[in-house]
Amino acid sequence: MSSPTRSVFARQALLATGWHSDVRLEFADGCFTAIDANVSAHPTDEHADIVLPPLPSLHSHAFQRAMAGLTETRRDPADSFWTWREQMYALASRIEPDGMRAIAAQLYMEMLKAGFTQVAEFHYLHRAPDGAPYARPAEMAFSVVDGASEAGIGITLLPTLYRRAGFGRPLAPEQKRFESAPDFIAGIMADIAATHRDNGRVRVGVGLHSLRAANRDDITDMLALVPNDVPVHIHIAEQQREVADCVEFLGHRPVAWLLDEIAVDTRWCLVHATHLDDDETRRFAASGAVAGLCPITEANLGDGFFPLVDFINAGGRFGIGTDSNVLPSANEELRLLEYGRRLSDQKRCRALPGMETGSVGRYLYEASLKGGTQACGHGGGSLAVGQRADLCVVSEEALSLPDLRGDVVLDSLIFARAAFPARDVLCGGDWVVRDGRHVREDEISAAFRSAIRHLRS
């Protein structure tokens, strides 16, 4: 049975064709059915000041939300990504399916309130704490997807292949929960896809943890087992030590090796790719793959600066991810991405191609929307007829100054607001955030607090 048609009337909206005034958006059965600009409101319309297409978070580790704020004490004079990872492993060793579901639901609720309606979940917490497989190998994956369903966010689940501790090294004991093989991952993908076949908010892709955790044979075997149209994500070149180890073991830098050995194309997302030389930057951009940039996490872990300007000038595509989820925030990810380049280059307004002039906020927002949608295999990502009915409502009074219109709205949202001021959020035709509050906030937050107390006890 079809659902009744509902509608929103916006004073201004960023459509696939740009900014428009007096826009009516109708939706039913989870999709937009009609969008018209320069029209009058109908008596039954819900009214909004500004309507935006929400962003995707193209890279997330949901379980790490359970350690947000707990890793900011120096425990080693040489504190780094690698020492942080030890604390992450300690957390990963304790989470059970019920706790995973509660943590995921809390995180995804926060994402919706922060301006995201789709998340690509890079999932490698596969096995029980003792390393044994669950009776249903996809048990933990289902916990993540169930958490997404509770929150009402769209999810692209990426069961992730993780076979080695480093180049040529077997998994360490603390990585026993991550152990997987191509057929194991393919089985999880198939189980999730079959169970959620008719669910427009659940999609499936595949993750390859990294070149240090999956070698060439692992990668080719994995790709041979999955459909040729699903997203493929991989961590790569995040840390300089990782690059040095790759050169020592494989004789090439990681991105160069991947582009030489594997057919990288538009279904790929290379997460972080922080440390690129000029040739890698040009070749990566030319491949059509998406750079999965996570500026808050990359800053938190001391990764370094992605060569954003050179990548954009080479025609590269990018999107943003929340990664370790220390602070889920769409506008802060974009702000930090731009400010990182300003600090490094000692110039302003960096995120624009070549000598082009214009709004940095608009460019960052639309480029991240397009790249993130591609990386999530979402198939939508805009306010257009036939697309999934996702939108974000922002009140004019929530902006930094009154009477803002067009591109300066995005400049204000990204650069002059502490948090993304999402008043209402629609995902798949359902209102999941109302007046800045999630529709199931009390229930989800209570379950999260209980799960964290259990973990910490």
Image (spheres, rainbow, N blue to C red):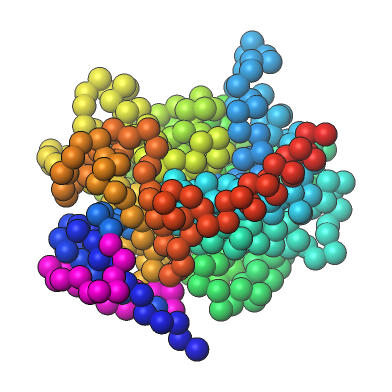
Kindly identify the residue that appears in the image at 51 percent across and 53 percent down. 438
Q: Can you give x and y, in whole percent of width and height, for residue 71 in the image? A: 64, 25
Kindly identify the residue that appears in the image at 52 percent across and 46 percent down. 110
Between residue 306 and residue 104, name the one nearer to us: 104
Say whether residue 107 is left or right of residue 55. right
Q: Quick one: quadrant of the C terminus?
A: top right
Q: Is residue 46 visible?
A: yes
Between residue 167 and residue 30, name the one nearer to us: 30
Between residue 224 and residue 365, name the one nearer to us: 365
Q: Can you give x and y, in whole percent of width and height, for residue 332 in the image? A: 39, 36
Image height of 75 relative to 453, above or below: above
Q: Which residues are magenta?
A: 29-47
Q: Is residue 247 magenta?
A: no
Kindly identify the residue that appears in the image at 54 percent across and 51 percent down. 109
Image height of 344 relative to 28, above or below: above
Between residue 330 and residue 256, name the one nearer to us: 330
Q: Is residue 43 magenta?
A: yes
Kindly identify the residue that appears in the image at 28 percent across and 33 percent down. 416
Q: Can you give x and y, in whole percent of width and height, for residue 136 in the image? A: 80, 65
Image height of 112 relative to 380, above or below: above
Residue 76 placement: quadrant: top right
Total labels drawn = 0
